[in-house]
Amino acid sequence: MKETGANQIIIILLLMPCLAGFVESGYNKSTKKDELIFISTEQEKIMGANVARQVDKRFKEVDDPLVQKRIEDIGGKIGNACERKDVIYRFKVLKSEEKDNYNAFSLPGGYVYIFDTLLGKLKSDDDIAAILAHEVAHVAAKHSIKQLQTAMGVNALMILGIGMQTDGRTFATAGEALTQLMMSYSREAEVDADALSVKYLKDAGYNPDSVLNALLMLRELRKKSPIRTYMYYRSHPYLSERIARVKSEIKGSMDFESYINIPKDESF
């Protein structure tokens, strides 16, 4: 992990007034659940914009306007198919500094990125749409916001949000939470994003089988990649389980291979 870049992101988020009295609750059309969110949509947009500026400093954008337009066009269709309309979805292709960095990520507020190394492995617009839809789904479901708020705790968020002085331990806990936020989502969040991406592809006119194809491709690529302790931003874990669930989502039923890859502590 690039500590300097990560620390800059953490410092910006820690210094930003996250709450200042805002609470949003209601029905989330993406997750189909009633949710209590302690970070308003406007604060989420500010948070995302702050981190996006750090991304722009950390990575170079691919300088081919046709490539960028292709991603924006595909992403725009996915954004139109998404239930969440209170943010603007922005899509950008970044130059990877590593030849085996097959990754994409999203930020609060609608910022979606894909590295050129991953894009080069995708064979069609449908495959690209599958990757972008997964990232849009994370934004729509507010996964990063919910993870941040859960990891830090409401009290820590309020202390940081109103700018009160606090002890070093609280800030250390907050920093760890923010680092975790940028590195990975929970198993549940990844599975939910996959299910939503299948829906978005169908609604946008793309082949939903591409979600499965993308996961199978990522599994093969990562088998060939060197083992890493962690990645800058985040990796996509639980691939076998995700593949099993996506098969069920597309087909509407579960085969034996899917069944054996689902955690046994869950019942159907």
Image (tube, helix red, strand yellow):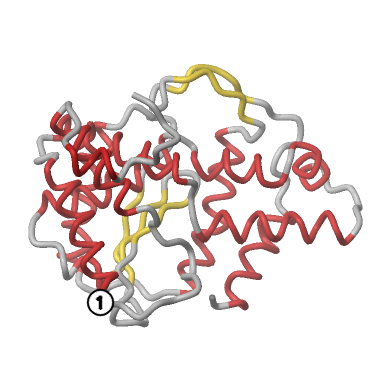
Q: Secondary structure at mark 1?
A: helix
Q: Which residue is at a point 30% across and 34% down the rendered structure image?
A: 196
Instruction: Pinpoint residue 61: horizontal percent, then vertical percent.
Output: 34, 71
Q: Looking at this view, is 144 or 78 the one in front?
A: 144
Q: Is the C terminus in the top left, top right, bottom left or bottom right quadrant?
A: top left
Image location (x, y in percent) of residue 193: 35, 40
Q: Which image quadrant is residue 124 in?
A: bottom left
Query: Which quadrant does the N terminus fall into?
Result: bottom right
Q: Position of residue 50 (x, y in %)?
A: 57, 57
Q: How many residues crowd mark 1 within 10 Å: few (<14), some (14–19), many (20+)?
A: few
Q: Which residue is mark 1?
A: 224
**Residue for point 52% across, 53% down:** 49
Q: Nearer the viewer, residue 106 or 223?
A: 223
Relative to 262, residue 85 above or below:
above
Q: Amino acid at mark 1?
A: Lys
Q: Position of residue 79 (x, y in %)?
A: 28, 38
